[in-house]
Image (cartoon, grey):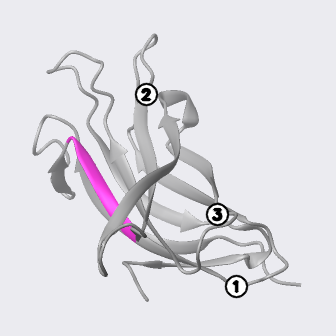
Amino acid sequence: MLSNKSELVWQGRTHLGDEPGVFSDAAYSGLAMELPITLQKNNSNGSDTAKLALVTQNAETFAGYPGHLITVTLHQPDAGMPENHFTETVLTTARLKGSDDDYKEFTVDLANQPSPAFLSIRVRIDTEVPPGLYNDFVVTHLSNKSQDSSFVASLGFRA
């Protein structure tokens, strides 16, 4: 049986928010960050869904607001264009809220998608909150938690 343990894809300290310097030990990226990853189907009999997990520090949200947006985008060749043109398709979104206790899992359906799948994971702070009240928090980990090791993940786009 293959392992169910999570596979670390990325680890670091990226500060999101509108107050640079709040976290002096983290790289400040502003209102959003986006990580490119490659998911390779590893088990042809396994699930067609991948489960990813994002770990943060100090992520909070105000009641009545939707939360910080996580967007998973597929990057694939554009069949209607000449060679080397790609399109982006949003596969799923999720919202990170203070009630998630700095941990958010989200599922990506990759049925009928090519393998390897080139994805980007974008985290954007909740901007429905008035400027000046934006939450400052740190993104620290992205992990692959795919069932039965159906998918193997790597940071960056790898052919």
Disc on res. 67: 2
Say what secondary structure mark 1 lies in: loop
**Residue at screen point 32% across, 49% down:** 138
- Closer mark to the observer between disc 3 and disc 2: 3
- Quickly name the residue at label 1: 42
Say what secondary structure mark 2 lies in: loop
Q: Is residue 22 above or below residue 11?
A: above
Say if the magenta span includes residue 35: yes
Q: Quadrant of residue 146?
A: bottom right
**Residue at screen point 73% across, 77% down:** 149
- Closer mark to the observer between disc 3 and disc 1: 3
- How far, Cα to Cα, is label 1 from label 2? 33 Å
Magenta stretch: helix, strand or loop mostly: strand
Name of the residue lying farthest toward the top: 64
- Quickly name the residue at label 3: 110
Say if the magenta span includes residue 84: no
Stretch in magenta: 31-36
